[in-house]
Image (cartoon, rainbow, N blue to C red):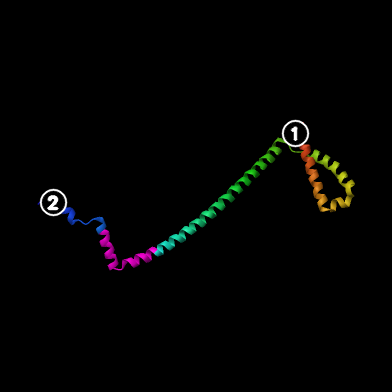
């Protein structure tokens, strides 16, 4: 038995007809309402998950910035530590004699500046005097490194 191609295509429904029939069946069984409810619930859940993802992304960016800042701080501290270790290993630090000599030069200046008690008991003056001592030690280091 030979089937005519035209006859076969006439009896086979098109894709659009299948979709239309499926919609009619869905309406007949009340599936449209159920699909709408499921779609609504899934859409709501999807929006909530998108919001949560945005929040996590924001937190991630903030934490990334903090980590980068902390890494820079650690790197800076490592460099300082290497400098200090190098100073100790190479004996480039100011030696004890230099510090003692500087103290002998500075103490009389401090005592003569405002009297022995007032120079020691005034916090601001004492802090600035310490800064002067530190600067003198730094200056001494520079002079020694240039020599």
Magenta segment range?
18-39
Q: Is residue 46 magenta?
A: no
Q: Position of residue 13 (x, y in %)?
A: 21, 57
Along the line of sight, the residue nearer the viewer: 61 or 96: 61
Chief SS of the magenta region? helix
What residue is rendered at 40% in x and 64% in y?
40
Q: Position of residue 91 (x, y in %)?
A: 73, 36
Q: Is residue 25 left or right of residue 145?
A: left
Q: Position of residue 41 (x, y in %)?
A: 41, 64
Q: Label for residue 117?
A: none
Q: Position of residue 19 (x, y in %)?
A: 27, 59
Mark positioned earlier in the residue sequence (2 or 1) = 2
Q: Nearer the viewer, mark 2 or mark 1?
A: 2
Q: Residue furthest left?
A: 1
What residue is rendered at 80% in x and 38% in y?
98
What residue is rendered at 61% in x and 45% in y?
72
Q: Are marks 2 and 1 in contact (CB under 8 Å)?
A: no
Q: Is residue 50 left or right of residue 105?
A: left
Figure quadrant of the C terminus: top right
What residue is rendered at 45% in x and 60% in y?
47
Q: Label for residue 145?
A: 1
Q: Is residue 29 magenta?
A: yes
Check disc 2: other Cα within 10 Å, few if <14, some if 14-19, many if 20+: few
Q: Is residue 108 left or right of residue 77?
A: right
Q: Label for residue 4?
A: 2
* Residue 94 location, quadrant: top right
């Amino acid at each position: 038995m030979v089937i005519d191609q035209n006859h076969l295509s006439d009896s086979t429904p098109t894709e659009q007809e299948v979709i239309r029939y499926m919609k009619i069946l869905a309406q007949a069984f009340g599936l449209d309402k159920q699909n709408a409810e499921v779609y609504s619930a899934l859409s709501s859940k999807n929006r909530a998950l998108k919001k949560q993802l945005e929040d996590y992304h924001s937190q991630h960016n903030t934490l990334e910035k903090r980590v980068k800042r902390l890494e820079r701080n650690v790197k800076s501290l490592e460099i300082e530590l290497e400098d200090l270790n190098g100073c100790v290993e190479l004996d480039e630090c100011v030696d004890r004699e230099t510090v003692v000599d500087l103290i002998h030069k500075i103490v009389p200046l401090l005592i003569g500046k405002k009297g022995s008690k007032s120079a020691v008991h005034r916090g601001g003056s004492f802090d600035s005097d310490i800064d002067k001592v530190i600067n003198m030690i730094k200056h001494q280091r520079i002079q020694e490194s240039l020599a």
